[in-house]
Image: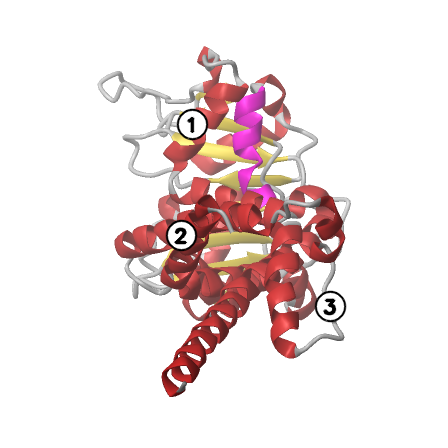
Amino acid sequence: MSTFKKTVGKLHLWLGLASGLVVFIVSLTGAIFVFQDDIRDLTEPWRKVEVQQSAYVLPSRLQAAALAQHPGVDAATTWVTYFGPERSATVFFIDKDDLPIQVYLNPYTGQVLHEQNLRTHFFTIIQEIHMHLLLPEAVAKWVVGISISIFVVMMLTGLVLWWPKRKQERKQRFTIKWGARWRRINYDLHNVLGFYAASIGLVLALSGLFMLYPWLLEPLVLAVDGGKPAPQEIMKTKLDTLQPATAATQPLPDIVYRQVRRLSPTHEMVLLGPTGTGKAPAFCWTYQKALHYYHRDEYAFHPVSGQLLETRFHATKSAGTKLSDMNYDLHVGQILGFGGKTVAFLVSLICASLPVTGTIVWWGRRNKSKKKKLRLQAV
C-alpha cells in the first residue's frame, strides 16, 4: 500500500471512530423519518377528509375553532396550513404552558378533528433526535454539523481506499462474498455497500448540512446562477412603520388567503405565517403539491392594511434559487416520489451500518495485531 493510501486510511479510521456514534444515530433516525407522512396517513385518520365541492372556510374561522379551548392564545401568533382537497387543515401554536399544539380541522366546515401535543409525538421526537440529538440547539448544531462534515470526508476517503489499482480486481470489489467467513462478509458489507451508497449518501449529508448552515448553500446557488443573483431573488421586504396605514376591515389572515389563492390558483398547499405585532411583514407561502416544499411562491404583506408588498413566484426564480428551494425534498428523497423516498431510506440504513461494520473491521485488525505480537514474543 502506498504512503498516500496509508495516510488516507489512518484519516478514515480516526475520523470514523470520532464521528461514528453521531452518524449512526442521525442516519437511523433519518431512515425512520423518511416515510413519516406515509405512516401517519395510515395511523392518523384525522389527517384526511372527504373531498367536497364547497370552498374552504377562511383561516380566521379555523383559528377561532382551534383556539376555542385555549383562551389567552393570540390568533396573530398561529400558523395556518391548508394541505389540499383530501387533507385536513392545521392550526399550530404555542399554548400558555409552552407546549407546541397542532389542531387538525376539516377545511370545508371548520370542525375540529383532533388536537396533538407535538412535544410527545413520536415523529417529532425522532426529528428532534435527528437534528439535535436532544441536546441544546446551540450545542447540537456543532456536534451534528461537525460529525456529518466528517462523514462527508469519510465517504470520499472511503472511495479512495476502496478503488482498486487493477481492472481484474474491480469485479470482486463490487460484490459481497456471502459464502466467506463472517469477518470477510462484514468487510464486504462495509466496503461494497459503502461504495454503492456513497453518491446518494453525499447528497443526503450535504443537503442536511445546508439546513444546519444555510450559508454553505450560498456559494452553490451563486455558482449555478453564474456568480450574480438577480435582484428579484433577494426577498427582504422593508416595512416603514412610521408611515401610517389604514387598518384592514377584515381579519388579516383572510385578506392574505384570498389574495394568494387568486395569484397561485393551482397550488394545493398554503402556509400562512403569524401576522405578528404589526411591526414586521406578514408572510405566506403556497406550494404546488401537498407535503412537497420545492415548487413554491412566496408573498409578503403589510401587517396592518394587508397590502401586498412583495412576491417571488417559482416560475421567475433563477436555477440556483430553485435548487435551494429543492433542498428539503432532496434530503428526504421525496423529490422523486415514493421511489426516491425508498432510495433515501435504504441509503440512510446503509449509512447507519457503516460505523458499525467499520468498527468491527478495526476491532478485528486490532486483535489480530495483538495476537501476532504475542506469538512473536512466545517465539
Q: Residue at x 67, y 52 (%)?
A: 196
- Kind of residue at disc 1: Glu
Residue 86 vs residue 245, the one in the foreground: 86
Whether 62 is drawn above or below 259: the answer is: below
Quick check: can you spot residue 232? yes
Span of residues in magenta:
319-332
Quick check: can you spot residue 259? no
Q: Residue at x 56, y 19 (%)?
A: 318
Q: Residue at x 73, y 57 (%)?
A: 172
For marks 1 and 3 on the same chain, the one whose residue lies earlier in the sequence: 3
Disc 3 to disc 2: CB gap under 8 Å: no
Residue 249 vs residue 87, the one in the foreground: 87
Q: Residue at x 51, y 42 (%)?
A: 207
Disc 2 to disc 1: CB gap under 8 Å: no
Mark 3 surroundings: few (<14), some (14-19) or many (≥20) residues within 10 A: some
The residue that mark 2 highlights is 11
Instruction: Give the numbered dot on residue 177.
Output: 3
The image position of residue 92, as x and y in percent, is 45, 53
How many numbered marks does the figure carry? Answer: 3
Label 1 to label 3, Cα distance in Å?
44 Å
Q: Main secondary structure of the magenta part?
A: helix
Instruction: Select label 2 or label 1 by which is in front.
Output: 2
- Kind of residue at disc 2: Leu
The residue that mark 1 highlights is 218
Residue found at the very far front of the displayed protein: 379
For marks 2 and 1 on the same chain, the one whose residue lies earlier in the sequence: 2
